[in-house]
Image (tube, rainbow, N blue to C red):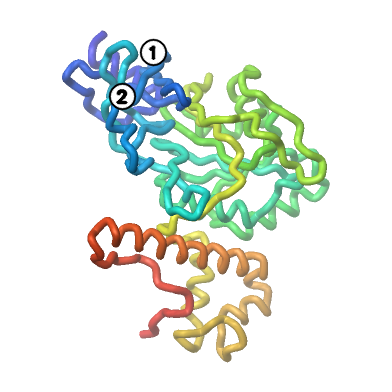
Amino acid sequence: MSDAETMERLRRIGWRGDALPGDGRRLARVVAQHRAGYELHDGASLFGAQPDGRFLKRGLDPSERPVVGDFVEVENGAPPHIVQVRPRRTVLSRAAAGERYERQLIATNIDYVLVLTGLDGDFNPSRIERYLSLIEDSGAQPVVLLSKLDTRDDADELIAELRERLPPATPIHPLNGKDPASATVLAPYLKPGDSAVLVGSSGAGKSTLTNTLLGTAKMATAAVRSRDSRGRHTTTHRALLSLPSGGCLIDTPGMRELKLTGEENLDLFADIEALADQCRFADCGHGSEPGCAVQIALDNGDLTPDRWRNYLKLHDEREEQAATLEARLRRQRGGRPIDRPHSPRGQRERD
């Protein structure tokens, strides 16, 4: 097969590069990761592979290992071996659960992050804001999907409430995940060569929507609990799927914990940051101080208490995670200080 033909088939699975590996290596994309190894696709066929020994070293930063969405160089063998991870153009990550700071990569080389939330008991604007805060620096575009329209008589009010809390440029699409006609709203995000990752809570309907987009019941589904609209983890691992539309979709297990990494800008709350800069005092604590622009906005309804509380929660979590990350980097650099891009709340200087 010629290089031009090889490049064309790789572009169908999301490759944006302009060069192929040499030395007898071939390029493929990570489709799934299991305990026994990786599943890869080279645009023509699916095959298994093992990671090179250096990816198995103790103490290696997990972000340096191949993850779903990566393009990797593979050496032929029995079995084939992954020997190099190509540079990632976009990365969606979160801080892993637990006290030890560690970044967990969710998906790479994606164009869109589809945040799916049910309009039943799963609906939570604050959690959607948390998702969008994690997505901000990924390089991918967030798209909010609202499923289970039939469960609420006040769906229009909920959507309007959410629209007021999110940046105007953020797409919001109500849909019925079981209806192929309803799912056509996603066509602009799943064009040939484009890649999207689907995220959301267990029971939100990710697997149902994935099956609709595939046109077949490939992903297992299950009923949700009536008391909280949560489901069981029917999806147990991340998997990249080729869709009839020509796009690629990464389905993920439900995420119960979404910890910030410490490097978020929280641009989602730029309006609140602008308000804080208008306070009379540079060290305003946004409580009972005179001339507090934040309190004025809360009093006149320009800022809702729920959004203010969520901003404070995410801001403080970001600062805590940033301090933990800074301490880790300082240890790695032999004690040298690290420049941090974020300043603590209430510590702004006035001109």
Q: Earlier in the sequence, mark 2 or mark 1?
A: 1
Marks 2, 1: nearer the viewer: 2
Q: Mark 1: which amino acid?
A: Ala
Which image quarter: residue 85? top left
Q: Residue furthest left?
A: 23
Q: Which mark is residue 301?
A: none
In the rendered image, the vertical position of residue 131 relative to residue 262, given as above or below: above
In the rendered image, the vertical position of residue 145 relative to residue 351, given as above or below: above
Placement of the C terminus among the 4 image quadrants: bottom left
Task: Name the residue beneath numbered marker 1.
Answer: 44
Helix, strand, or loop for circle 1? loop
Placement of the N terminus among the 4 image quadrants: top left
Q: Mark 2: which amino acid?
A: Ile
Percent across and percent down for residue 41 are 40, 19
- Image point (61%, 19%), residue name: 218
Percent across and percent down for residue 251 are 55, 31
Residue 345 visible in the snapshot: yes
Q: Residue furthest front?
A: 58
Helix, strand, or loop for circle 2? strand
In the rendered image, the vertical position of residue 93 relative to residue 68, given as above or below: below
Crowd band around label 1 with a 10 angstrom C-alpha radius: few (<14), some (14–19), many (20+)? few
Crowd band around label 2 with a 10 angstrom C-alpha radius: few (<14), some (14–19), many (20+)? many
- Please give left or right for residue 187 compared with residue 67 in the image: right
Task: Name the residue beneath numbered marker 2.
Answer: 82
Which image quarter: residue 332? bottom left
